[in-house]
Image: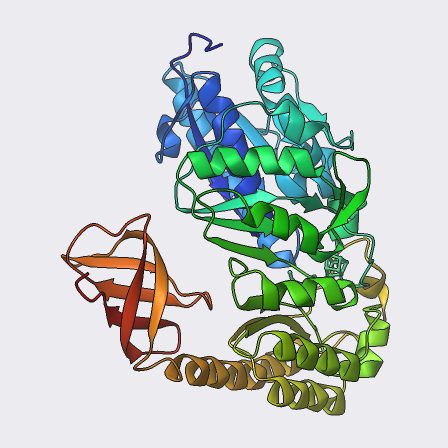
Amino acid sequence: MQRANTKTYFLKTFGCQMNVYDSERMAEALARDGYSQTDDVGNADLVILNTCHIREKAAEKVYSDLGRIRDIKDTRKRDGKETVIAVAGCVAQAEGSEITRRQPAVDLVIGPQSYHRLPELIVRAETKSERIVETEFPGDEKFTAMKAPRRISSPSAFLTVQEGCDKFCTFCVVPYTRGAEFSRPVAKLEAEARELAAAGAKELVLLGQNVNAYHGDAPSGRAVGLAELIRRLADIDGIERIRYMTSHPRDMSDDLIAAHAEVPQLMPFLHLPVQSGSDRMLRAMNRKHRAAEYIDLIARVRAARPDIALSSDFIVGFPGETEEDAEETIALVKAVGFAQAFSFKYSPRPGTPAASLEVQVPEDVKTGRLHRLQALLDEQQGAFNAKTLGSTMPVLFERPGRNPGEFIGRSPYLQLVHAVGDGNFTGRTANVAVTETRRVSLSGVIPAA
Ligand code: 5AD
Ligand code: SF4
């Protein structure tokens, strides 16, 4: 039922795709309550920041934004308008009432497991003008309780299938902010995927902090792994493409590798963070795999799907990292060959084991190692893209480009593609002849049908 409401909200999302998915679900719940979205904070009755705690910079950005939003709230107040400020996401979960202490203008702090209570808590914040901090872990309720119909803003739709992590890498806040691993049941995911397909989704991106550890219950009560979930979702009419992220090397089962060979809808792309090429660092990070095991795993994935595009995450300057360790990471990158990757300077996170290690690496050393690694990864990305020159690939177009007749989409390998063609291709898959490649994107033409 739609409440009478003329209110507007402003929603800003930081961090990973899990947050993007959560923001979409919050937006749907607010729309059902009659809220409309605005891009202008000054015009918003409700401001939500969906935050990220993964690295220090991400968390500090939230506090600087909150300072600016407080000023806007004060200005609006002078005009007789109230503003509710809500902080959601992982900073909310990790810092709780520390947020309202540091920024008293905040009315509501809500952790990622409590979003189904958002509408009710907003009303409480508005009417009782009390500060609310809600960071419980009530389990699987949040998805089920958010009953608003799914909408899509792109033919590529996110679907969170798993949340949380039990791995406890020593640098990472996720096991603390997102809690223990939890997999959503298969039937609920199939129902949501069908809703997304009916709304026009052509691609499903299955999300989870540890997505390949997925082990949801099938209707029979039997636990089902990610590979079987993918096979089931591939049967849904209209779903042309499936991707998943982020995976852990330890959970890359034979079954999932086989799915890459056997399920045509499963795209030839794998984001598989390795973090370091040094066994000493991997042990200190509690990664539960060695460098040689990762390289062997990649060989098995490539045997199943020779053209697969590989992506990874790297951390440089983990406590105690020496030049030799950094060289081992470079050697691993050379041995594997990545199509793209993300690399970060180690950032000590409060409450994680690595943050209290005494042998922190100096900032300038971290910067030097990061530049060296990124130069190599950039070179590999450019080389991977260059190989597609002259080929023809199916591209799922997500939006029109800036120039007339231009559309922007993704190749099977997740490359960004700009292409020109005659017709409207948004929301459709079309073949593209690649005529130009750059480090971060490709250009091409859509031949007339
Ligand atoms: N410092 C730097 N990078 C980190 N990541 C996670 N925690 C930290 C940290 N404390 C990186 C890892 C992870 C990605 C999502 O963020 O590479 O895979
Ligand atoms: Fe963090 Fe490690 Fe879990 Fe990934 S696997 S979310 S890096 S603890």
Does residue 177 lie above or below 309 as drawn? above
Q: Position of residue 136 (x, y in %)?
A: 77, 30
Q: Is residue 192 left or right of residue 12?
A: right
Please report the residue visible at 51 percent of the width from the left and 57 percent of the height from the top: 265
How many marks the image carries: the answer is: 0
Is residue 133 visible to the viewer in this orientation of the structure? yes
Q: Is residue 212 left or right of residue 125?
A: right
Q: Specify the color scheme.
A: rainbow
Q: Position of residue 79 (x, y in %)?
A: 36, 17
Does residue 157 lie above or below 346 as drawn? above
Indicate the quadrant where residue 110 lies.
Answer: top right
Quadrant containing ligand 2: bottom right
Please report the residue visible at 63 percent of the width from the left and 19 percent of the height from the top: 121
Is residue 321 visible to the viewer in this orientation of the structure? no
Q: Nearer the viewer, residue 385 or 122?
A: 385
Does residue 405 lie above or below 157 as drawn? below
> In the rendered view of the protein, which quadrant contains the C terminus?
bottom left
Q: Position of residue 447 (x, y in %)?
A: 20, 67
Indicate the quadrant where residue 435 lies.
Answer: bottom left
Please report the residue visible at 32 percent of the width from the left and 51 percent of the height from the top: 428
Q: Position of residue 232 (x, y in %)?
A: 62, 46
